[in-house]
Image: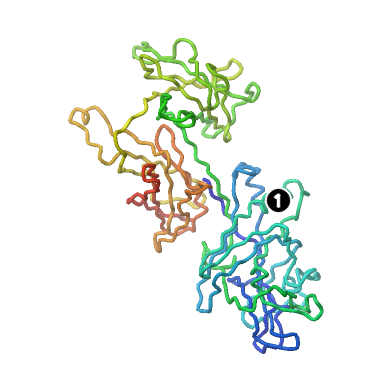
Amino acid sequence: MAIKRYVASQDNTITNAYRENLVTRGTGSNMGASDTLELFSLYGQTSGSNGYSSELSRILVKFPIDEVVSDRNANQIPESGSVQFYLRLFNVTHGETLPRNMTVNVAKISQEWEEGIGKDMSSYLDLLNGASGSSWLDARKGSEWTNVGGDYEFTNYKTFTFDNGTEDLEVNISDFVEEWIENGIQGSGFGYPNYGVGVHITSSQEAYFSSSLGSDSGSVIHNTNGSQTSYYTKKFSARNSEYFYKRPIIEARWNSSKQDDRNQVIFSSSLMNAEDNLNTLYLYNYVRGKLRNIPNLEGGKILVSLYSGSLAILSGSVVYLPTGSKLELPIGGDVLNNLDTNITGGIVDTGVYTASFAITSSVPLLDKVFDVWHSGGVEFVTSSFEPKTLSNYEGSINNSWYSKITNLKPHYSVNENARFRVYTRKKNWSPTIYNVARNKPELEIIPSASYEIFRETDKLKVIPFGTGSDGETIMSYDVSGNYFDLDMSLLEPDYGYGVRLAFYNDDRQSWEVQRKEYKFRVFE
């Protein structure tokens, strides 16, 4: 699981636009209970002694950062620097004019505000009149904004440009969220507490207005660098939207894939660089079905030593057993010095340990190697692997694959965190009669594999392929093949969903989506 979504806890549109009479402005109106959010800038709808009019709207959104803090404390999301947070607002299709080439700013709000219960987004007749809520002038009941149109922290803000006006908004606000988390964990920290973000059109595109006072005039913002072109109108779904996947969210993304090379350890080769020569083994310490840290590790570290194996008879069966001295290993990965016999492993998650190393070939080649995990003279686990030599090819590889999710169920609970196991082999596997009698098709591990989840009724991509820098949908692999975990609470219940797989073709430098799709349903 490498995605978590946090739906907005408050949102509102605030405006100083004119009502239908083009005389009275809707500065006291509230739209906190509307199912849409709206951005616009209108220039010159009316004129007066101060010139042409300026009318604006802005969006306020706040998120439940206490839930993010709770998830981090519970190790449900990684530490700062290992996770990225994105603000996502989703477009609402409408028949009005769309603002093209419009840039918006996303800035932290710098004081507390209230949502309110107004809904009127056309006549602006849902007035606060002293009730709880926010408006163009009021942050909350009994407290005005310091500046009309809201108070924002502009030393650090994000931008997003809508080329066509139909796009969803997506900006990385990781530093905002980490600041809010810091405040939430410590009770007092740096910067502003979580007051959420304001979204509004950049000042050079908000409507021009020059006040004779040289400052804001009533509810109208003095903006001599503004635009004399209107940008009308951009709409997003609000948190009260009936559409489950269109509500404003902060989306946490990180690469949680675990790449266990136990089934594909390769002897070092001069054809590979130092990084490619490294192999990584994992140890999963399950205690009564749950991952638990190994207690009392000496110096907090776990060590791994490798041994060659030899045939022995145990209880009447011929088996391999570790023999001889520890293998000497070249420097690299978690081997700190050349010819060390210990790999200094690390912990990557609760009860999950890793050790990276290179292994040189010998004559005759080792056909089985034992890895012994130990600390302070205590040996915890002994396992084994069969190292391979690097395969050489005279031409480019053009593999096609047969894959299957082997443990797919027809139904999943929305409260379930499910693991999907993917079996893959070469599609053109064609054994001889002798091989059919004695062998199964060889399991293939795809080092770079990804998944996508879509809703079956309309093919909406609920979780798109995340193969960029965040790698949020990159699959893990171990000795049994590729796999990924899916938090079903991300999915709206009572719908059918599909899974698509994509494998990276290094020769073509591209991701190739596999044709087969896998279907399941989620229930409450």
- Seen at 43% across and 28% down, the residue is 262
Residue 371 left/right relative to 178? left
Residue 215 in which image quadrant? bottom right
Dot 1: within a 10 Å radius of its alpha carbon, few (fewer than 14), some, or many (20 or more) residues?
some
Q: Position of residue 76 (x, y in %)?
A: 59, 44
Which residue occupies the extreme left position in the image? Answer: 433
Give the x, y percent position of residue 359. Answer: 45, 22
Give the number of marks.
1
Residue carrying label 1 = 179
Question: In the picture provided, is 349 more to the left or to the right than 452?
Answer: right
How far from the left and from the top, in percent, is residue 239? 59, 65
Q: Amino acid at mark 1?
A: Glu
Quarter of the figure with residue 360: top left
Question: Residue 23, image x and y in percent?
Answer: 71, 88
Q: In this rendering, is residue 521 above or below 229?
A: above
* 14 relative to 421, above or below: below
In percent of the image, x 58 and y 69: which residue is there? 102
The residue lying at 57 percent from left, 54 percent from top is: 251
- Tell me if residue 181 comes above or below residue 397 in the rendering: below
Q: Nearer the viewer, residue 311 or 89?
A: 89
Q: Nearer the viewer, residue 260 or 226?
A: 226
Question: What colouring method underlies this structural image?
Answer: rainbow
Q: In this picture, is 432 found above or below 27?
A: above
Secondary structure at badge 1 equals helix
Taking the image as shown, residue 8 lies to the left or right of residue 284, namely right
